Amino acid sequence: MITSLYPVLATSDVPATARFYADLLGMTPTFTSDWYVSLRADDAEIAVVDADHATIPERARGARTAGVLVTVEVDDVDAVHARVVTAGSHDVVLPLRDEEFGQRHFIVAGPDGALVDVVTPIAPSGEFAALYA
């Protein structure tokens, strides 16, 4: 039986990466050390680890997170987007937009190499819904 499942992202700068997730998503650290930080907001959790730490298998040390898209569903993507744009503190790599498959979202690049897709579900387009009904 699974009791928890969350990503742990490898990074070269644990404090900066933890601050990124805290700032972007309002997450609060639940455990902090110099090599690992776990953050939580409600039932969501994410952690970051120093990519060179001894707990990482030697052959994988030094590797940054790549090819990872972390999707975070929020109540109001427009409010999060407005806060991010106003602050100017995050690299928005996909502007806010509606997708025909039923998402309103934007994507920011994290300092750890992951992309963070901030999403609010919306109704899919009629054409999309007809194809997959």
Image: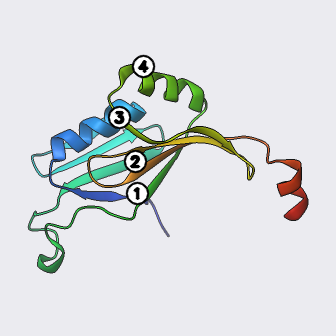
C-alpha separation, residue under disc 1 versus residue under disc 2: 6 Å
Crowding at label 3, few (<14), some or many (≥20) Cα neighbours within 10 Å? some
Which residue is disc 1 drawn over? Answer: 6
Left or right placement of residue 50 versus residue 25 in this view = left
Q: Do residues under tags 1 and 4 come within 8 Å of each other at their CB atoms?
A: no
Q: Nearer the viewer, residue 72 or 84?
A: 84
CA neighbours of label 4 inside 10 A, class few (<14), some (14 to 19), many (20+) = few
Mark 2 or mark 3: whose residue is earlier in sequence: 2
Element marked by disc 2: strand
Cα separation between marks 3 and 4: 10 Å
Q: Which residue is mark 2?
A: 45
Dot 2 or dot 4: first in sequence order is: 2
Q: Tags 1 and 2 in contact by the CB under 8 Å rule?
A: yes
Q: Residue at x 39, y 30 (%)?
A: 26
Q: Which residue is mark 4?
A: 86
Q: Which residue is mark 3?
A: 90
Q: Position of residue 30 (x, y in %)?
A: 28, 40
Snapshot colouring: rainbow
User: Which sits earlier in the primary sequence, circle 1 or circle 2?
Assistant: 1
Q: Amino acid at mark 3?
A: His
Residue at position x 25%, y 41% from top? 18
Residue lying at the far top of the rendered structure? 86
Expressed as whole percent of the image width and height from the top left, the position of residue 67 reads 39, 65
- Determine which quarter of the picture holds residue 103: top right
